[in-house]
Image (tube, rainbow, N blue to C red):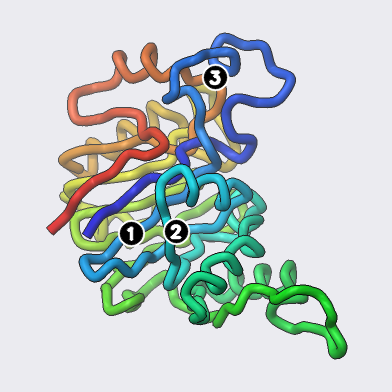
Amino acid sequence: MKFTLLGSGTSTGVPLPGCACKVCTSKHPRNHRDRTSACLTLNDGRVILIDAGPDLRYQALKHNVGRVDSVLFTHAHADHILGVDDLRSFNFASRNRISCYGSADTMSAITSSFSYIFNPRPGYEGGMVAQLDPHVISNDESCVIEGTSFKLFPLVHGSMTVTGFRVGEIGYATDFNMITERAEQVLAGVKHLFIDGLRYEPHKTHVTIPQAIEIAQRLKAHRTYIIHTTHTIDYDEVNASLPPGIELGYDGLTIQCP
């Protein structure tokens, strides 16, 4: 299977409109970061999308994502769900419904935010809405999506619980300020770790880059990619300062896994 990081930026994306800092005005392609999301392409071509943020349409075109069979939502913050409406494009292409997975809180927020999709009003006369089937999963268990096993774990993101996962030798832990015991157990020794690392300055709901490094080293991850970074992070400067085996994630980063 193939794992592709579709976006590596924080909730604003990078660059920020109206900002003239050196990162936002940089021409370096890795200083251009869409909102964080990813996808897993299985050997038979089926695609599992990880979150559907506001950049979904552009990301799909840019990274040649021609189908989506299922979506795993980590949580219901705007930068991770506001592309839900764009999932209908994949319904048009496949003529199939798309299964959506998330915790009870996550799916409740999504079905409420997109009530016109999940509870359409009688007499609706607009175009076809996204054809989605919601499924509730538990962060303390494993689940099977498109025949693929995901080991799930909870992450603390302020007052919210975020769903992290390990699929094969890939671990994914976005948006958190405190790692849980189950997360440490599931991620121990993982080959490829994608981990939140917002910036160097402290933040109430995200780990910093130094904290992400400490966690990755404690987990003994073979290779670590720091994601969800802000416009204070210059790719070349920060990447050169990171310890061996740890680097900044970037849009389009692809990993082939057996």
> Where residue 161 appears, x then y in whole percent?
53, 60
Q: Secondary structure at mark 3?
A: loop
Q: Secondary structure at mark 1?
A: strand
Could you tell me the amino acid type at mark 3? Answer: Thr
Q: Is residue 112 above or below residue 86?
A: below
Q: Residues within 10 Å of mark 2 (few under 14, many from 20)?
A: many
Say which residue label 1 marks.
40
Could you tell me the amino acid type at mark 2? Answer: Ile
Which label number is shown at residue 58? none
Say which residue label 2 marks.
50
Quarter that holds the C terminus: bottom left
Q: Residue at x 62, y 11 (%)?
A: 21
> Where residue 11 appears, x then y in whole percent?
61, 40
Quarter that holds the N terminus: bottom left
User: Given contact means CB atoms under 8 Å apart, are the residues at marks 2 and 1 in contact?
Assistant: yes
Q: Is residue 120 visible?
A: yes
Q: Is residue 236 above or below residue 191?
A: above
Residue furthest to the bottom: 122
> Where residue 253 appears, x then y in whole percent?
32, 39
Circle nearer the viewer, 3 or 2? 2
Rendered image quadrant of residue 194 = top left
The first of marks 3 and 2 along the sequence is: 2
Could you tell me the amino acid type at mark 1? Answer: Leu
User: Given contact means CB atoms under 8 Å apart, are the residues at marks 3 and 2 in contact?
Assistant: no
Rendered image quadrant of residue 113 = bottom right
Say which residue label 3 marks.
232
